[in-house]
Image: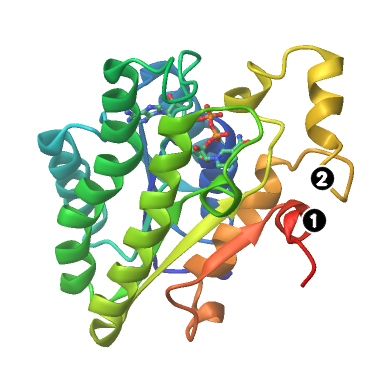
Amino acid sequence: MRLQNKVAIITGAGNGIGRETSLLFAKEGAKVVCVDIKDHDGKAIVEEIQHEGGDAIFVNADVSKESQCKNMVDQAEKAFGGVHILFNNAGIMHGADGDAVSTDESIWDLTMNINVKGVFFGCKYGIPAIRRSGGGSIINTASFVAHLGAATPQLAYTASKGAVLSMSRELAVIHARENIRVNALCPGPLRTELLMKFLNTEAKKQRRLVHVPMGRFGEAKEMAQAALYLASDESSYVTGTEFLVDGGITAAYVTPE
Ligand code: NAD
């Protein structure tokens, strides 16, 4: 098993990427701390892991709240004696997030608080815990939009993911000699609730797929596989990367010289 004896904190574990990653990490031997704001979804994933013989606990935390992030790390250390993997994955894309003119300050603040400050708080408390455990791997979920921007405006979201990407690079450099690796996972458009609630007609879906060379949306399971690589010792010389798992969308946008 690829994550034997590792303890992993996964935020946004109730759905999508977080859910699939929780299942996969547990299958690979990790003890998983499933974090979400939704009790029902978070508890359901823990039950599923336990049913399959794995080890997991649920912690309700809103990643935009410092005290709750501290608590999620405390709970991980209390339950499993350490932390080796921190997957700062929770994020939102708000329906009222538009262009610079139409986006309210409240939407901007909400998006930044969860998507950016959530990663900061995760690291603020997660890094000392990983240090205490002798090192480990941090994965921050950014997005392909951190590289490209988006064709339909979602300015706060795009800016937040740019921040996650640059923050991940700096974290990687600062903590490299402490045996702590930090990488950004940059998914392409996925068939998860987050995106599908916006692309809610076949026409909208097809419009987005025009830009994806593979001609399909990515699956949360495919992101989980990428996260597994970054979490495991197989990626022991990989830090500071922007791991694009995007069906080729970024390559398709690169203009030839
Ligand atoms: P999802 O909506 O399916 O799941 C997100 C989970 O995060 C939910 O369970 C939700 O309850 C939880 N969550 C939301 N706010 C939270 C908070 N404040 N604190 C704790 N948990 C919270 O989304 P997903 O598609 O799995 O997305 C996961 C990550 O991937 C996000 O950061 C998202 O921005 C990023 N991403 C998604 C796509 C895509 O196309 N779906 C593409 C690129 C990047």
Q: Nearer the viewer, residue 77 or 98?
A: 98
Q: Is residue 86 left or right of residue 197?
A: left
Q: Is residue 159 left or right of residue 222?
A: left
Residue 112's place in the image compared with 27, above or below, is: above
Residue pointed to by mark 1? 252
Question: What is the secondary structure assignment of the residue under circle 2?
Answer: loop
| Residue 70 image point, x, y percent | 13, 44
Q: Quadrant of residue 136?
A: bottom left
| Residue 211 image point, x, y percent | 81, 42
> From this viewpoint, which residue is outermost toward the left?
67
Q: Is residue 107 left or right of residue 183?
A: left
Mark 2 and mark 1 in contact? Answer it, CB < 8 Å.
Answer: yes
Residue 61's place in the image compared with 144, above or below, is: above
What's the amino acid at mark 2?
Answer: Val
Q: Quadrant of the N terminus?
A: bottom right
Residue pointed to by mark 2? 212
Residue 3 visible in the snapshot: no
| Residue 9 image point, x, y percent | 35, 50
